[in-house]
Image (cartoon, grey):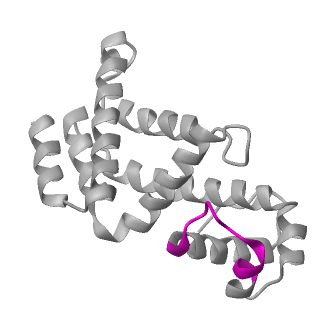
């Protein structure tokens, strides 16, 4: 469940959660208020009132997705950097997380293409989030060094590339073997 901005109503939270489930199933790039509102038992007018605009709703949905992503990544990233990367990969490769990860890829791509839109800083923020999760798996003395930064950046690049490959091909066996070999 989301941590709603201060002063938001229960209806805001309820509709945000319903909209989040909707975009996990259908994607967010082509989000249209009327079909969304119908599917979640609301109206476009109510959504515009609660979220200020369609862009405001998109930003709220992306923030909601980042909450889930971060909570789950943090729960998996433990041990050494290599162990954390393997644990994170196990989470990423799980079929049950595919809807969230497809949404992540869609939002990440749109953020890179349209950084001035509602996608804004999603890609940059996601990179920072993931690097922070990986940094927590490094000893403090290493974490603060250029070497430590380079190691977690490379780990992130491998995980992100493997995730994109997995989402494109569905070949979990091949990709998992490669990730495990890399982080061995």
Residue drawn at x 52%, y 45% as measured from the top left: 109
Q: Residue 123: which quarter of the image?
A: top right
Q: Please determine whether, in this image, residue 33 is positioned above or below residue 169.
A: below
Of 149 and 110, nearer the camera is 110
Q: Please determine whether, in this image, residue 29 is positioned above or below residue 38.
A: above
In the image, 25: left or right of 153?
A: right
Q: Which portion, as a residue range, is magenta?
A: 25-37
Residue drawn at x 32%, y 45% as measured from the top left: 77
Q: Position of residue 24 (x, y in %)?
A: 52, 70
In the image, 56: left or right of 119?
A: right
Q: Please determine whether, in this image, residue 122 is positioned above or below residue 31.
A: above
Quadrant where the image shows the N terminus = bottom right
Q: Residue 97: which quarter of the image?
A: bottom left
For residue 162, say whether it is visible: yes
In the image, 54: left or right of 183?
A: right
Q: Position of residue 136 (x, y in %)?
A: 37, 33
């Amino acid at each position: 469940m989301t941590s709603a901005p201060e002063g938001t109503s229960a209806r805001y939270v309820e509709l945000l959660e319903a909209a989040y489930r909707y975009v996990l199933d259908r994607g967010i790039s082509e989000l249209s208020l009327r079909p969304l509102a119908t599917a979640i038992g609301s109206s476009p007018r109510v959504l515009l009132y609660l979220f200020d605009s369609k862009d405001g709703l998109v930003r709220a949905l992306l923030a909601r997705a980042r909450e889930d992503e971060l909570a789950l990544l943090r729960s998996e990233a433990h041990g050494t950097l290599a162990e954390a990367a393997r644990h994170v990969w196990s989470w990423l490769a799980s079929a049950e997380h595919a809807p969230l990860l497809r949404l992540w890829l869609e939002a990440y791509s749109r953020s890179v293409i349209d950084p001035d839109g509602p996608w804004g800083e999603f890609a940059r923020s996601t990179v920072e989030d993931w690097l922070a999760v990986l940094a927590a798996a490094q000893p403090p003395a290493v974490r603060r060094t250029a070497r430590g930064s380079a190691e977690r950046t490379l780990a992130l690049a491998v995980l992100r590339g493997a995730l994109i490959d997995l989402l494109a091909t569905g070949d979990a066996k091949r990709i998992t073997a490669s990730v495990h070999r890399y982080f061995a």
